Amino acid sequence: MKTKIHEYQKNINILMSKKKLVSLLIVISLSSFAQTKMITKTGKLTFEASVPAFEEVKAKNESATVVLNPSTGEIASLALVKGFRFKVALMEEHFNENYMESDSYPKATFKGKIENFDVTKLTATAKDYTIKGKMEMHGKSKDITIPASIKKTSDGIEIDSNFTLNTEDYGIDIPSVVSKKVSKKVAVKFGATLK
């Protein structure tokens, strides 16, 4: 009887060792996978649709998620529409309810690739790149090409971009009542440091 118990205990120990080994291998593979991607959840997006002589139409979102695969140059970004903050609360309310319909379309996403990207050639001096991809917002999708300035810093890889989006491309209607006060051409600034 003692021999059977001893053998049973031995088998359990072997199984536990195998489980620990499998768990260790999973952790190692996940951590090596994680190292191939760089990420931030504090990407900054600012947009401005102001028209001279009228009240500023400007908002900032400082919680965009950005993921970069440094070995391929593939990049993706997600921003929650309700994350944009305006100086005027009423403007923020109109933006979410009347223009972006953020309850129906809660996020804006971009997925693309940085052309001719080579992470090993990045330095502290910013270089100009072109990013091509697909922007999805307000239920519409459009291929876009944007310029970007990319450099290596002590904190990671820093990406900055300035580009323009057209509200009509995304089915965002600007009522005629305010059409002279809000530009259909929206200036966008994007900045992120990925680690």
Image (cartoon, grey):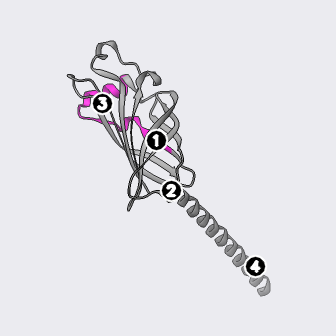
- Spot the residue most to the bottom: 2
Quarter of the picture holding the C terminus: bottom left
Q: Which of marks 2 and 3 is nearer the N terminus?
A: 3
Which residue position is annotated with label 3?
92
Q: Which amino acid does label 4 sit on?
A: Tyr
Q: Which of 17 and 41 is in front in this view?
A: 41
Which residue position is annotated with label 4?
8
For label 4, the crowd category at 10 Å Cα-Cα, with few meaning under 14, some 14 to 19 and many 20 or more, is: few
Q: Which of marks 3 and 4 is nearer the N terminus?
A: 4
Which residue position is annotated with label 1?
78
Q: Distance between the residues labelled 2 and 3?
A: 38 Å
The label nearer to you, 1 versus 4, is 1
The label nearer to you, 3 versus 1, is 1
Residues at circles 2 and 1 in contact by the CB criterion of under 8 Å? no
Q: Is residue 111 above or below residue 49?
A: below
Q: How far apart are marks 3 and 1 (CA)?
A: 19 Å
Q: In this view, does 180 lie above or below 43?
A: above
Locate residue 53, reporting x and y percent. Answer: 20, 22
Q: Give the range drawn in magenta.
A: 76-98
Residue drawn at the location 50% of the way across and 50% of the way down = 68
The label nearer to you, 3 versus 4, is 3
Q: Which secondary structure lies at badge 1?
A: strand
Q: Does the magenta stretch include residue 48?
A: no
Q: Nearer the viewer, residue 67 or 138?
A: 67
